[in-house]
Image (cartoon, grey):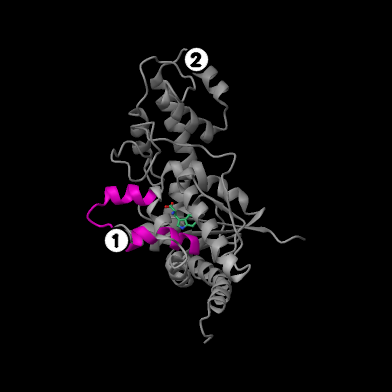
Amino acid sequence: MDEKKVLLSGIQPSGDLTLGSYLGAIKNWAELADQFDCYYFMADMHTITVRQNPADLRRHTLEQLAQYIACGLDPEKNTLFIQSHVHQHAELGWVLQCYTMFGELSRMTQFKDKSAKNADNINGGLFAYPSLMAADILLYQPDFVPVGQDQKQHVELTRDVANRFNSIYGNVFKVPEPYIPKVGARVMSLASPTSKMSKSDTDPNGCVYLKDDNDTIMRKFRRAVTDCDAEVRFDRENKPGVSNLMEIYSACTGKSFEEIQKDFDGKGYGDFKTAVGEAVISAIGPIRDEAQRILKDKAYLEGVYHAGAEKAAYIANKTLRKVYKKIGFVQR
Ligand code: TRP
């Protein structure tokens, strides 16, 4: 049998996972395990580029792992690990900083955004973040990196750094492709439906979290921003709020936009919002409950991240040794 292609992605445990990251990404990841050799990690080292509360960071990291598993990422079939448990990330991150140009880092939109938002803490790590991300990726020699649109620029930079390194030292790194899955909903904020649903949304009603209880979910959908023509019809341009609700409903129920339009023909937005809330509750309610159960099973969770780190470190170490040798470090 052919070797499976390798796929890797990470999410920062800087807050609670959202309905947007579930419907847009994680839900689809669960289906990739048969086809690819998959690595997913909690990018805790990236989160400290912005000041974190230590207790919250620890909690978010473990919650995120429990939620990944509850979303269907079977730890027997996927390698799930915590970034800081695999020290090769920091080591290769340093090396790659020396192969990433100041100009390249200055042009990253995420750096510009985050430094505008954190004007009192524009630290070196925030600037060098893309080099660490390149290390996260290149350590595992993946073929594909599934990311959202907002992370494409980082994967492009990773490719540039890999090519630069390879052109000096020979074929050390596989040059990965961004993987933008064909399926996967693009979920926008319920409060301002022209911007992406994000855990950093300033309006708490704009974002649904995977850990929200049923009443909270329903309340957020009932308050979702729509428009004033009371027609359930997909039109992102002119009806962003309703279109977003349709996208969410479609992702949760499998119904097409035409079916949804027909089902709610002549009904008001009130009925529709309630239906979307109910669909979301049936989709993510069981995940929330399962994640809570897993989170209480400390021994199980520890077993998962130990095994994940061990497997990840084995691969990461092979790449790092090769890099150290190529650049002229004396072997220990
Ligand atoms: N930068 C990503 C984000 O902010 C998280 C991340 C870190 C990542 N390292 C990665 C994603 C490696 C994919 C691959 O969402």
Q: Disc 1 marks which residue?
A: 123
Identify the image quadrant of the N terminus. bottom right
Q: Nearer the viewer, mark 1 or mark 2?
A: 1
| Mark 2: amino acid | Asp
The image shows residue 244, relative to residue 8, as above or below, that is above
Q: Secondary structure at mark 1?
A: loop
Question: Residue at point 53% right, 57% down?
Answer: 160
Residue that protrudes farthest toward the left in the picture: 120
The boundaries of the magenta stretch are 110-135
Q: Nearer the viewer, residue 274 or 45?
A: 45
The image shows residue 239, relative to residue 312, as above or below, that is above
Residue 288 x/y as whole percent = 43, 47
Residue 152 x/y as whole percent = 50, 48
Q: Nearer the viewer, residue 158 or 91?
A: 158
- In this rendering, would 77 be left or right of 267? right
The image shows residue 31, relative to residue 192, as above or below, that is below
The mark that comes first in sequence, 1 or 2, is 1
Q: Residues within 10 Å of mark 2 (few under 14, many from 20)?
A: some
The alpha-carbon separation of the residues under discs 1 and 2 comes to: 53 Å
Q: Residue 79, can we see it? A: no
Tell me the chief SS of the magenta region. helix
Residue that protrudes farthest toward the top in the picture: 266
| Mark 1: amino acid | Asn
Question: Residue at point 54% right, 85% down?
Answer: 331
Q: Secondary structure at mark 2?
A: loop
Say whether residue 211 is magenta.
no
Q: Disc 2 marks which residue?
A: 265
Residue 80 x/y as whole percent = 52, 61
Residue 108 x/y as whole percent = 41, 51
Residue that protrudes farthest toward the bottom in the picture: 332
